[in-house]
Amino acid sequence: MHKKLAALFLLIPILLVSNCERYYHFENGRISGVDSIEELDEVSAFSFAIMSDNKGDSPTSKPEFARMVKWIDLSGCRFVIGLGDHVKKGWENSFLDFIKENKWWSGNFYPNIADGENEYYGENQGDWCAGAPLLKAANLYDNPYVKMRENGCECYAQIPVENFTIHLIQLHYPDEPAEEELAFPNSSRDYLMNTLNSIDKDYGDIVIVAAHSRTGFWIDQLSTEQKTVVMEKCDMLLSATTHFFERKVIKGYENSGPLIINTGSITYPNKYCPPGFVYVNVLKHPLSLVVQYLDASEEEREMQWSNYAYIKVVDGGIIETDFRDVKPEEDFNRSVGYLERSYTQEEMNKVVEGLYLTVGDVDDAFINAGSGLAGGEIPYKDLWDVFPYNNEIYIITLSRTDLEKLFENEIDQITEPELRIAINNFEGDYLIKRLNIPEERVEKTGIREINLLQKWLNSTKQGDFPLDTEDAISAK
C-alpha cells in the first residue's frame, strides 16, 4: 500500500474518535459527561439568555437582577432576549440607564414591546405600539442584524454567532386592549407567517418567536394553518406576562416541534416560581438547545431539576431532563400544615388582613387574599394561591397631606393627623413614588407573605388567630 494512503487510513480512526468525543448523548434525563453548569459551558458552542418582566429594575435596584447580570457575564452569553414589561410607569426605571451605560447590554439586548412599554411611553397599556421607543433605547434601530417592521415595534433579527444564525421574530401582543383582534391583530400574524416563510432553514439556523401575550401562551391565538407553520419551522416559542415559568405542550407535538415556554420573571415571579431567567446552552452535536430556568435568588448558579430544564434538539425532539435531584424546599407538593376546616376567600381576606396588622404598630392594612384554603393537609403550592407574589410587607407612615392626595373627597372621614399602614412592596413602591414619601417614613420589614402565612398555619388550631408580633417578626 502506498505510504500516503496508509497514513490516511491510520488517520481515519483518530478523526472518528475525535468526532465521537464531541457528540453528546442524552440518557436518563442527563447529558453524557456533563455534571455541572460550568462543564456545560465548556462543551457548548455558545450560550444566550432570556429575561422578562423586570418592570424597570436593574442591578442597582434588585439583587436578583444583579446576580443575573453577573452570571450572564461569567458564562460568556452572546446576547439576551427580552420578553417585555421592562419598564413601569411611575417607578424608578433604573433599567433604562443600565442599558444605556452598559456597553455589552446596549449592543446585545433584543427586547420585546409589551403593555408596560406602551403605558410608559404612551397613554396607557392598550396604546398599541406606543412602547416602540424602548427599541431605540436598546439601539435596535441601529443594529445591522435587525429588520424593523414599518410599525416600529415588531422586528426580525438574524443574529450571527460563529457558524450559526439565530432567527428571532419579536411580535407585539400586549395584555391590553381586551379584544384579542386588537391586542394581537391579523397584521402581526401575517407578519409572522411571511417572515417564517422567508427563512430557508438549514443546519445552524435556530428559529425563535417571541410575544408577551395576554394569557401566557400566544400560540393559542393562531389558526390551525398558522399553528402548523409555526410548529414545523420554529425551535422555541417564548411568552411572558404570567411571571410563571412553565412549558406548554400542544396535542400531537408532545415530544416534537418547538419548545414552548413562559419565561417567568427576574424580579416579580408569580406563585412558587423563583425569580429567575432562562439560560440556553447550544450544543453542536447534535445541534441542541439546553434550556434551563435559573433561580436568581440563589448565591450560585446550578444545573436545574425537571420542572425547570429541557433539551430541544434542533429539527428534532424535545427531551425532558432531570439534571439534579429536587431539594426538599423545592417540592411544591410538600405538606406545610393542616387545617381542620376550609376557609373561603372572604374568610381568608380577614385572616391576611390580620396577618398584616401583626407586623408592627399600624393603623390599617391594605391587602386581599387571592383565594381561600381547603381543609386538611395544605400543600406548599396552595399558599401561593393566597399570596401569588410573596411580597415583602412595608409599613408606611402617611402624612395628612398624603391622605388628602389619596382620599380627596373622603378625607373628612379621616380624623388622624397621620396614618401608619401595612402594604405590600409592589403597591408600596408605587405609593412612595407617587407621593414622594421620604425614606424615614418607610419601613421595609423584610417579612414575606408566604413565611407569615406558614407561621399562622403552624400556630393555629381550627384556624384561630393567635399569631403575635414576635411570630410575625420571625417570619423574615
Image (cartoon, helix red, strand yellow):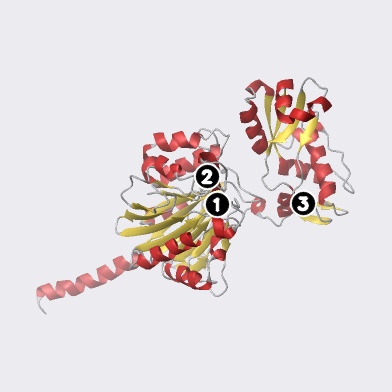
Q: Residue at x 47, y 59 (%)?
A: 188
Instruction: Return the residue nearer the eye: 337 or 353.
Output: 353
Q: Nearer the viewer, mark 3 or mark 2?
A: 2
**Percent coordinates x, y for residue 279 in the rendering:** 47, 52
Which amino acid, mark 1? Pro
Query: Is the residue marked by circle 1 packed among few (<14), some (14-19), or many (20+) residues within 10 Å?
Result: many
Q: Tell me the CA gap for discs 3 and 2.
A: 30 Å
Q: Tell me the CA gap for discs 3 and 1.
A: 26 Å
Q: Residue at x 67, y 55 (%)?
A: 331
Q: On the image, numbered disc 2 is attached to which residue?
A: 118
Q: Residue at x 41, y 70 (%)?
A: 315
The reply to whether discs 3 and 1 touch (Cβ–Cβ < 8 Å) is no
Q: On the image, numbered disc 3 is attached to which residue?
A: 371
The reply to whether discs 1 and 2 touch (Cβ–Cβ < 8 Å) is yes
Q: Identify the mark nearer the N-term, 3 or 2.
A: 2
Instruction: Return the residue nearer the eye: 251 or 126.
Output: 126
Query: Is the residue marked by circle 2 packed among few (<14), some (14-19), or many (20+) residues within 10 Å?
Result: many
Instruction: Return the residue nearer the eye: 312 or 96.
Output: 96
Q: Identify the mark nearer the N-term, 3 or 1.
A: 1
Which type of secondary structure does the marked residue at label 3 adopt? loop
Q: Residue furthest bottom?
A: 1
**Percent coordinates x, y for residue 415 in the rendering:** 83, 22
The reply to whether discs 3 and 2 touch (Cβ–Cβ < 8 Å) is no
Q: Is residue 93 above or below residue 109?
A: above
**Percent coordinates x, y for residue 77 in the rendering:** 40, 48
The answer to whether any part of residue 323 appears in the image is no
Q: Is residue 4 above or below residue 213?
A: below
Q: Nearer the viewer, mark 3 or mark 1?
A: 1
Q: Is residue 318 above or below residue 369?
A: below
Q: Is residue 250 left or right of residue 411?
A: left
